[in-house]
Amino acid sequence: MFVALQAAVAIAEDWPLVTGLLVPLLLAKFVAAWLAGWLCKDGTAERLMMWSLSLPQVAATLAAALVAYQTTNAAGERLIDLPVLNASFELVLLTATRDPPHASAAIPPAGPRASAGARLATRDAHDVAR
């Protein structure tokens, strides 16, 4: 618990680093999802869903950050330092907890204006629930 408190304090002190990692991540994934949706002629809801589903990257981020932190060069210096490791943890925490609700909010309801595929998927989901 004490280590987590120290990490939280360190993250609060290094907020420019956390912001510098988080903002480009959000923007780059948003642009990629928007362009992919544009190429596939998807609507706004589908583009937002693609974006929000691409954000949680817990496993890859944790693995890369921990390996980079434990890797040392010939002089014994770490590849990344503790503030970057803490910022990576904050990145994981923010993207894993805040973005799945965005994905569910981006899914349009399957009503009369929904596509045939969406109505079929909704009907199948209701059949399975019974």
Image (spheres, rainbow, N blue to C red):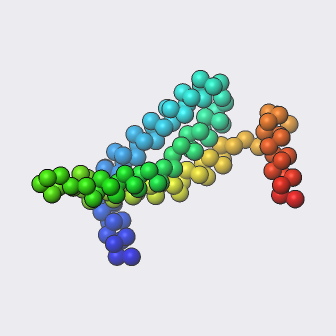
Visible residue check, residue 60: yes
Vertical arrangement, residue 111 with respect to residue 73, above or below: above
Q: Quadrant of residue 37?
A: top right
Q: Quadrant of residue 23?
A: top left
Visible residue check, residue 14: no
Estimate the x, y position of residue 105 in percent, counting from the top left.
Answer: 66, 47
114 with respect to 62 (left or right): right
Q: Which quarter of the figure is the N terminus placed in?
A: bottom left
Going 56% across and 44% down the picture, which residue do you hit? 52
Estimate the x, y position of residue 55 in percent, counting from the top left.
Answer: 51, 46
Going 87% across and 59% down the picture, which residue do you hit? 130
45 with respect to 119 (left or right): left
Vertical arrangement, residue 65 with respect to residue 107, above or below: below
72 with respect to 4 (left or right): left
28 with respect to 19 (left or right): right
Estimate the x, y position of residue 101 in percent, counting from the top left.
Answer: 61, 52
Vertical arrangement, residue 30 with respect to residue 40, above or below: below
Count of marks, rendered view: 0
Q: Residue furthest left?
A: 75
Going 78% across and 39% down the picture, which residue do you hit? 118
Taking depth in this image into account, of 121 and 34 the one nearest to the observer is 121
Q: Residue furthest front?
A: 74
Q: Quadrant of residue 7?
A: bottom left
Estimate the x, y position of residue 128 in percent, counting from the top left.
Answer: 83, 55
